[in-house]
Amino acid sequence: PKHFKTNEGEVIPQPSEGYGKIIATHYNSLEEKGLDERSKSRIFYMRNFHNWIKSMLINEYLTKIRDNKKHNAPIRVMDMGCGKGGDLLKWRKGGISHLICADIASVSLDQCKSRYSDMQNRSGRDRNPGNIYSIEYIEADCTKVRLREKYKDPSMKLDLVSCQFVFHYSFESLTQAECMIHNAAECLQPGGFFIGTIPDANDLLTRVRKSRLNSFGNEVFQVTFESDINKPPLFGAKYNFHLDGVVDCPEFLVHFPTLIKLAKKYGLRLVRKEKFYEFYKRMNSEGRHLMGNMKGLEAYPPYPGSHLVGTAVDDYVHAEEFLRNEG
Ligand code: SAM
């Protein structure tokens, strides 16, 4: 097994088979462990803000896709790392026709399935149910398995691949990052989009470099680096994300220029990269508002992802600003 030596000389063994299992176990156990009240309230606004970001992003690209299509042409999407299906309702509001949900964590995928059937049952009682998209599920490590071979119809081409707060797990190694981007790229039709959200590596590094002992955070969360913070490797630049002693998940820095290169290799061209607060400002200045009521959008147990960290303390400020404006 590999080892990492911290500044204090502590030797931390690294699993030789990689972190996939540890990450899956972490997400699978979130439900049972739960968070204490303190964390719940502290992350409530952040989660709302992240949900808003995802809704606006999904909406922005579904609109572009629809504009380029003939009236009523079907829109097919993959939610890569769908988790418990936090975005299922967003896809419904977006009027898509088919969704492929892929995730490494079986318990999360089960929760996603029951949420989909809840949504289906509820829609049966709606006065204007509209159409609910069809769905298929793939339980797989998207950094190691070729997803296309698992589609019900492997020849199907998609319009959008959405990868929300997931892609950074692939930066454990070059082969894993390549596999994930390949999975996204090969199923898209020309003109299709890959959209995603990840923690900001530069921001994490700036903060940890200002800190002592390779670690920073507050009374709720903590980020601890287990890689060289002055010269992090392009892949496998690992840090641990802890939330209130409950969550403890390994994550990896995404070196963005490398991501752009890899994406290019598989036929994806960078369209836009924005920090959350830039996106937030642009959406506001374009006068876009969320369809429906954000707070009522999805009520489910908070689940603390890496995004809380990656999006910087600044985002607490923007989350507050957002809530003031949205009422
Ligand atoms: N996209 C969902 C959302 O925004 O609500 C879930 C985001 S959650 C922070 C990260 C998800 O990525 C978890 O569900 C986890 O199981 C999944 N994940 C992590 N590594 C993965 C991998 N190698 N292959 C597939 N899914 C992975």
Image (tube, rainbow, N blue to C red):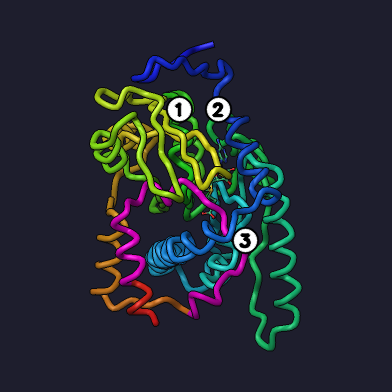
Question: Is the CB–ligand 1 distance for label 1 below 8 Å?
Answer: no
Whole-angstrom CA distance, mark 3 to mark 2, is: 25 Å
Indicate whether residue 278 is drawn in magenta: no
Q: Position of residue 34 (x, y in %)?
A: 64, 53
Whole-angstrom CA distance, mark 2 to mark 1, is: 8 Å
Query: Which amino acid lies under the numbered mark 2 shown in the image of this protein?
Result: Tyr
Residue sitting nearer the eye, 47 or 271: 47
Query: Which amino acid lies under the numbered mark 1 shown in the image of this protein?
Result: Glu
Q: Which mark is residue 66?
A: none
Whole-angstrom CA distance, mark 3 to mark 1, is: 28 Å
Query: Which amino acid lies under the numbered mark 3 shown in the image of this protein?
Result: Pro
Indicate whether residue 306 is drawn in magenta: yes
Q: Which residue is drawn at 54% across and 38% down?
A: 248
The relative height of residue 312 versus residue 3 in the rendered view (above or below) is below
Q: Name the residue under label 1.
A: 172
Apparent side of residue 124 relative to residue 208 in the rendered image (left or right): right
Sequence-first disc among 3 and 1: 1
Which residue sits furthest bottom?
A: 127
Residue sitting nearer the eye, 61 or 255: 255
Tell me where the magenta segment starts and ends, as one range.
Answer: 292-321
Q: Which of marks 3 and 1 is in front?
A: 3
Circles 2 and 1: CB distance less than 8 Å? yes
Answer whether residue 62 is visible to the viewer in this image.
no
Q: Mark 2 points at which residue?
A: 19
Q: In which quarter of the image is ligand 1?
A: top right
Label 3: which secondary element: loop
Q: Where is residue 204 in the image (x, y as percent from the top left)?
A: 31, 40
Q: Name the residue under label 3.
A: 301
